[in-house]
Image (cartoon, helix red, strand yellow):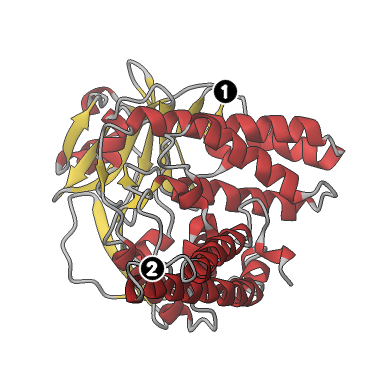
Amino acid sequence: MKITDSQKPSPAGFQTVSFEGIGLSCEMIEPVDLESDRDWEQIVSGLKPWGEVPDPGKIRVSSLSEDERGPIAILEGDKDWVAEFLPWGSDGLIRMRAVAPSSITQAPCGGYRWNGADIVLIRELCSDDYDINIQISESLNSGDSELAKKLLWGCGDLLGRHHREVESTRTTPPDPRRWNKRMQGLEEKLRSQSIWRAPHSRDAECMLSIGDLRLSDFSEGSIKIGRPRLSDALLTSECEFPAIRDLSSLIHDLSRLHFQNSCDIDIVELRSSLIDGWKHSAPEKWCSDSVFYSHRGGLAIWEYEQCLLDVVEAVSHQSGAPQPATAIIGYVTPYQKKMFNNRVLGAFSMMAGFFGLASLVNTFPPSQDEIPLPLFSLLLSFLLLRYYRSLAPPPELPFTRFA
């Protein structure tokens, strides 16, 4: 992507930068300079604070760094603070996530907004050196599958407990039309050869989801509410998402970790532990069998979305094919073909059921000689439907097992 001139205004101490590429574009608001204490005062002068933030006049900028999510400043004052900049903004729900009644999350204690958009998040600096991502990596490298599964089960359980606590905060009906439209937008921008639309389950309610979630966001007993990823700016969402999307983000991060460590532990066992941990404590409706039902999208379609988001970011950086996302997408077509073949049985079930009901209606009231055939048709319809549902790929099996 190339830098282009931007005519949009920016707050004092910031600059707006536009990027354009083939089918992709975004705008970023970044601090012009942040080296002296007076720079910090200028940066926050035009912003509206919320929550707990440090007194700008008593702050000293200790250090400035940057990661893939944007600049990070360490501030010293009456406390030590971390200022995390959001170059491409957010979905507007960060403040709601921060004040949501969850004892699980490490949320920002405050921040700064401009024109209604989050620009900076403020956290108190903590010295928590418990990194579950490193522990899982070490267990994968050492071949300790029991420890890895235990850690992953704990992550899933923690996420489920968070979802249970925020269940009452905000829920809206499922939004499959916008979800499918978003998927279409991703595929069109990438000129993808794979196409996937799904009806989704009625139990997959929209809720106050975390969004992008990594194993590195988990510490002992808490989950960090982090900043949005670049793909959220390259393809802005016009909808909210179900809880299973948070789980899919974590599942896909497990795939990254498994690929990076090139371990021999079966990933199916690891995925099962993570999923079982989440189902143990998540709201029953959000983790029901119908939500996981692959023929209606299930976990699989959200995992597919995570892979596409990885590819979108790689295209914007021209950094080459991201793995394992690209390899996983290559198995989506065989996965869909298997489900399509399964639908033949579903069609037979509908035909048998229709024939049975039509026979009963046409012969009503039926004689004893006329009852066996429609009853047999209805029984056959039920058995075929049950068998068809049993053929749905289980969520613990990755796409790569359907070559």
**Where is residue 234, by image quadrant?**
bottom left
Residue 385 showing in the rendered view: yes
143 sits left or right of 250 in the view: right
Q: Which residue is mark 2?
A: 366
The amino acid type found where label 1 is placed reads: Glu
Frontmost residue, 41 versus 358: 358
Give the camera-side residue of 381 and 37. Answer: 381
Viewer-side residue, 391 vs 102: 391
Give x and y (percent) for residue 323.
66, 64
Are the residues at dot 1 and dot 2 in contact (C-beta closer than 8 Å)?
Answer: no
Tell me what residue is drawn at x 48 percent, y 84 percent. Answer: 191
Give coordinates of residue 108: x percent, y percent.
34, 31
Say the numbered circle drawn on residue 220: 1
Q: Secondary structure at mark 1?
A: loop
Q: Which residue is at 49% across, 34% downward?
A: 159
Q: Which residue lies at the image location 51% right of the left edge and 46% below the top edge?
A: 247
Q: Quadrant of residue 324?
A: bottom right
Q: Nearer the viewer, mark 1 or mark 2?
A: 2
What type is the residue that disc 2 sits on?
Pro
Secondary structure, mark 2, is: loop
Task: Please provide percent x and percent y for residue 185.
Answer: 37, 75
Q: Is residue 118 above or below residue 82?
A: below
Q: Residues within 10 Å of mark 2 (few under 14, many from 20)?
A: some
Q: Could one spot residue 321 in this view of the protein?
A: no
The N terminus, quarter of image: bottom left
Q: Is residue 156 left or right of residue 354?
A: right
